[in-house]
Amino acid sequence: MQDTRSGADALARFIARMDAIVAERDRPEAETLESVGKALGDLVARDDWLDPQFAEPHPQYYRQYLLYADPQDRYSVVSFVWGPGQKTPIHDHCTWGAIGMLRGAEVGQAYVQGAGGMAEAGPSERLEPGDVAFVSPTIGDIHVVRNAYDDRVSVSIHVYGTDIGKQSRHVFDPATGVAKTFVSGYANVERQPT
Ligand code: FE2
C-alpha cells in the first residue's frame, strides 16, 4: 500500500507550527508574519494534501472553505478556491493575513482610499505555486484578488490572525471609496445566528 502519510499530515504539521507561533505573545507583527510565511511556504511547497472537497469551485462565486479555526480565535486557515475568471470586490481584512499559492495562479492589486474613490497602490502582484504574500492594516490591507486564469481553477491557502469568517470587515465602492461592512463566513460552515 502506498504511504500517503506525509501528504495527509501536512496540514496537521502546519497547525502545530501555527500553534507554536501564536503562543509567543507580544511579538511584533513583522516577526509573526515572517514565521507564518515560512510555515505557509512549506505547506504550499507541495500539492498533495488538500482534501478535494475543499478545492471544489462554485460556478458563480469564489469559495472560502474553513480548514482549521484555532479554538481561541488566534488564527484560522482557509482554502480559497477560484473558478475560472473569478475575482473579489475591493476588500480589507482588519487583521493580518498570509496567502500561499497552492495550485494555478492569482493576481493581487493593492488599493488605497483616495479623495476621488479607490486608487491602485503599486503594481499588481502575481502569485505562482509556492509563493507567499501578506496583508495587514500596518502593511496594506485593501486589495482585489483574481484568478490569473480564465480557463482553470486556482487554489490558495490563507492564514489570518483571527477567525476570518467571523471578522467584521469592509468592501469598498471603487468610484466613491465608500466602505460597507461585511462578514464573509465560510462555504462549509453554517452561519451562526448573531
Ligand atoms: Fe483578501
Image (spheres, rainbow, N blue to C red):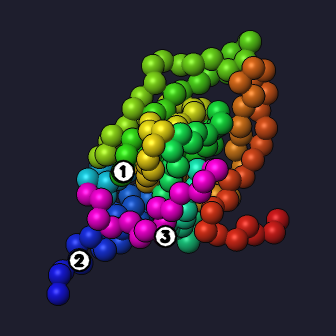
> Disc 2 residue type?
Thr
Give the image location of residue 59, x and y in percent.
60, 54
Kindly identify which residue carries mark 2: 4
Q: Earlier in the sequence, mark 3 or mark 2?
A: 2
Looking at the rendered structure, which numbered label has been put on residue 103?
1
Which quarter shows the C terminus? bottom right
Residue drawn at 71 percent across, 24 percent down: 174
The kind of secondary structure the magenta stretch mainly shows is loop
The residue stretch that appears in magenta: 46-61
Cα distance between the residues tagged 2 and 1 = 19 Å
* Foreground of the two, 28 or 114: 114
Q: Which numbered marker is on residue 53?
A: 3
On screen, residue 144 above or below 161: above
As displayed, is residue 142 above or below residue 118?
Answer: below
Indicate the secondary structure of the residue bearing disc 2: loop
Badge 1 marks a residue whose secondary structure is: strand
For the N terminus, the quadrant is bottom left
